[in-house]
Image: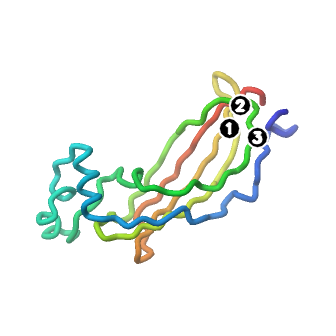
């Protein structure tokens, strides 16, 4: 069974496109931020020294740029694509837009949506892309960052 219709478009649940859902909340403790930064070998005191950070412009320890990847979240909506092969999915790209610092004491809320599903022909055959947008907000409802990501999976039977 092919996953594409007669026009070569992917068959999937179009009801998920643009539908934003809550995928979780997380309290950001100072100890967690320091531990995460030290695990990366970070030496900048803004990330690991509370006394230094509290006297600085942010008045708090702040998260290293990649910290958001360690936050446990629920999965985003599934567009329910019927793949015809057992290939694996992998990250095709990611764009991160930083709006505000994540600080110790913040409670982050994440909302995600599937923004696009499409096919493309690669060197090894048909590829199916799923694009998502995840927005992280703090307890003041300020956006701290937006992650636009794309996953791809080969589906050579298209």
| Colour convention | rainbow
The residue that disc 2 covers is 155
In the image, is residue 53 above or below residue 72? below
User: From this viewpoint, which residue is outermost toward the right?
Assistant: 6
> Are the residues tagged 2 and 3 within 8 Å (C-beta)?
no
Is 150 placed above or below 63 here? above
Residue identified by numbered label 3 = 82
- Identity of the residue drawn at 64% across and 27% down: 122
Element type at marker 3?
Answer: loop
In the picture, measured across the screen, residue 109 lies left or right of residue 120, that is: left
Placement of 54 over or under 76, stated as above or below:
below
Say which residue appears at 67% left-offset and 51% top-offset: 78
Cα separation between marks 3 and 1: 11 Å
Residue sitting nearer the eye, 51 or 9: 51
Identify the residue shown where x is 23% and y is 56%. 34
Residue 24 rendering spot, x and y as whole percentages: 51, 64
Q: Are marks 1 and 2 in contact (CB under 8 Å)?
A: yes
Classify 10 Å Cα crowding around label 3: few (below 14), some (14-19), many (20 and above).
some
Up the image or down, 74 lies above or below 84; here it is: below
- Quarter of the view holding residue 125: top right
Q: Which sits earlier in the primary sequence, circle 1 or circle 2?
A: 1
Q: Indicate the quadrant containing the N terminus: top left, top right, bottom left or bottom right.
A: top right
Left or right of 97: which side holds 19? right
- Which residue was labeled with disc 1? 128
């Amino acid at each position: 069974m092919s996953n594409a219709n007669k026009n070569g478009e992917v068959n999937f649940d179009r009801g998920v496109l643009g539908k934003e859902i809550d995928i979780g909340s997380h309290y950001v403790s100072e100890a967690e931020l320091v531990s995460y930064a030290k695990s990366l070998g970070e030496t900048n005191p803004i990330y690991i020294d509370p006394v230094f950070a509290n006297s600085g412009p942010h008045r708090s320890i702040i998260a290293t740029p990649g910290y958001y990847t360690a936050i446990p979240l629920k999965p985003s909506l599934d567009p329910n694509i019927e793949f015809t092969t057992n290939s694996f999915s992998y990250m095709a790209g990611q764009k991160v837009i930083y709006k505000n610092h994540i600080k110790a004491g913040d409670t982050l809320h994440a909302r995600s949506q599937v923004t696009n599903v499409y096919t493309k022909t690669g060197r090894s055959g048909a590829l199916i892309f799923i694009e998502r947008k995840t927005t992280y907000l703090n307890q003041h409802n300020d956006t701290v960052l937006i992650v636009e990501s794309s996953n791809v999976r080969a589906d050579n039977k298209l």
